[in-house]
Image: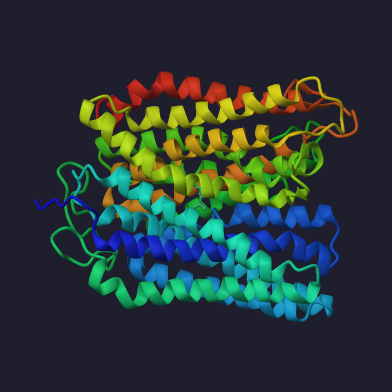
Amino acid sequence: MKKTKGHPKGLYLLFVTEMWERFSYYGMRALFMLYMVQALLFDKGTASSIYGSYTGLVYLTPLIGGYIADRYWGNRRSIIIGSLTMAMGQFLLFLSACYFREVTIAEYLMFCGLGLLILGNGFFKPNISTMVGRLYADDDPRKDSAFTIFYMGVNVGSTFAPLICGLIGNTGRPEDFKWGFLAACIGMLLGAAIFKIFKNKYICDPEGHAVGVAPTPIRKTEDTDTGKENSINHRRTIQMITGVVLLTLLFSFNKTGECGNWFSDADWIGSIIYATTIIIPLFIITDKSLTHVEKLRIGVIYIIAFFVIFFWAAYEQAGASLTFFADEQTDRHIGNWEMPAAYFQSFNPIMLVTLAPLFAAFWSFLGKKGIEPSSPRKQAIGLFLLSMGYLLIAFGVKGIMPGVKVSMLWLTGLYLIHTMGELCLAPIGLSLVYKLSPLRFSSLLMGVWYLSTSAANKFAGMLSSFYPENGISKTFMGYRIENLYDFFMLFVIMSGTAAVILFLLSGKLQKMMKGVE
Ligand code: GLN
C-alpha cells in the first residue's frame, strides 16, 4: 500500500468545502437571534426557543442524510444536494429579511428557510465527515490527524463567519440583516461549486478509485465489511418511525402529567430529539446483517456518543449562559475600548485553529514514543479539560456579589481550556466513528454521532435556564444553585464525573474495539 508523508489533496478539498459550509452556518447563526428580536420584533423568550429548536434539529437530520446516502445516493450526491438545499434556505432568509416589515410574509419565508437549512445540513454534515476517512486505507495512521485538519476547516469558517456576516448584517439598521444572510448564501454556493468542480479529480481512495459514489460497500476490509448491504428496509424503517412517534408521545404526555421532571419538561421538539436518540441507535445495532464483532464496535460508538452529550451540553453554554456572563459580569475594557460580549464567540475558533497543528504534532510525538492515549482516553481527557475550564471560572466568581464584574482573563482561560478539550474530543471522535463503523453503515452512524450533539444542544438550553438571576435559587436534580459559583460547579461535577467514568471504562472499550468482550 502506498503511503505518502503529507495528506491526499482530497482532504484539502473537503477542508475548503466544509469551511464554506460552516461559514454559512455560523454566519447565519450569528445574526439569527438578533434578526428575530430587532427586525421581526419577537420577544427574547420566543426567539430563544426558535433558536434552540433550530440548533437541535439541525443535528437531528444527519440521521436521515446518513441513511439516504448509505442506501441510495452515496456521499457525493448527498453533499451537493445538501449544499444546494442550504443555499436555498439562506436565500429564503435573505428574502425574509428583505420583507421584514411585512411580518407575516417574513415569518413564513423564515420558517421555510429554516426547514431547508435543517434538511440540507442533514444531507451535508455526516457525508462530508465520512468522506474524510474514505480517502485513506483502513490501516492508515494519518486518520486522526486528517480529521484534525478537517476540523480546522470547520473552525476557519466559524472564525470568519460572525465577523463578515456580522459586519455587513449587524449594523444596527434592521434593513441590513439581509446582506448578512446573502453572504451566508453566497458562501454556501461557493463551497458547493468548489466541491462540484474538483470532486472527480481529488476525491479518491489511495488506489485512485472514486469514493462516495456508490452507496453499496466499495471495498472489503478484513473483519468489518463482508460486502453485505445493511438490512434497514422499508419494514424496519416504518418500525423505527413508529417507535420514535410513540416514545415522543410518551415524553410529551409526561409533560402534562403531575410529576414533570427535567427530562419530561422538554417541549415537543425536545421530545422528538430524545426519543430519536433512544430508538434509532437500538434499531441500528439490532440489524440482522451485523456480525458480533461489528456490534461490539458499534457499541463503543454508542457508549462514547452518550458521554459526549455531557461535553457538548456544557460546551454549548458558550452561546447561552456564558454569553450572559460575558455581557453582565465580565469587565470587557481594553484601554478605553469596551469589547462587545459577542466577540467572545470568536475566541474558541481562533484558539482552535492556532492549537490544532500543535495537537496533531503532539499526538504523533506521543505515538512515536508509543505512549499516545487510546481514542476513548482522549475523549475522557477532553471531558476532564472541560470540567477544569469550569473549575477555573468557578474560582473566579467565588464570593462575588451579583453585578460585580470580573476580569475577562477568567473567561479567556475557560475558553482556552475548553478548546484544548475540544481538540482531544471532537476530531478524534469523528475519526473513531469512521474507523469503528462497518462501511455500509458509516454515514448513518456518523448521523448517530451528531445525534448526541442534537440532544446536547437541547439539554444545553435547559441547563442554561438555571443561570442564577436576582438571588432566586433554583434546583437541578436535587442540586441547589444560588449563585454563579454553584452554577459553574454544576458543570464541573457533570463533566468531571463523565470524564472519570469514561476513563475507567476506556480499557474495556479498547477491548471491544478489537472485537473482544
Ligand atoms: N464546531 C463543530 C462544528 O460546527 C461542532 C460539531 C459538533 O459535533 N458539536 O462542526
Relative placement, left or right, of 176 versus 140 is: right
The residue that appears at 53% across and 41% down in the rendered structure is 278
Q: Position of residue 346 (x, y in %)?
A: 60, 51
Q: In the displayed structure, would residue 135 be above or below residue 183?
A: above
Residue 106 or 403: which is nearer the viewer?
A: 403
Relative placement, left or right, of 321 versus 418 is: right
Which residue is farthest front?
A: 335
Q: Quadrant of the C terminus?
A: top left
The residue that appears at 24% across and 54% down in the rendered structure is 7
Which residue is farthest left?
A: 1
Residue 268 visible within the image: yes
Q: In the displayed structure, would residue 504 be above or below residue 328?
A: above
Q: Position of residue 392 (x, y in %)?
A: 63, 25
Q: In the rendered image, which quarter is residue 328 located in?
A: top right
Q: How many marks?
A: 0
Q: In the displayed structure, would residue 354 be above or below residue 403?
A: below
Residue 286 visible within the image: no
Q: Position of residue 123 (x, y in %)?
A: 46, 64
Report the coloring of the rendering.
rainbow
The residue that appears at 78% across and 77% down in the rendered structure is 175
Q: Position of residue 168 (x, y in %)?
A: 68, 71
The residue that appears at 87% across and 30% down in the rendered structure is 402
Q: In the rendered image, which quarter is residue 159 located in?
A: bottom right
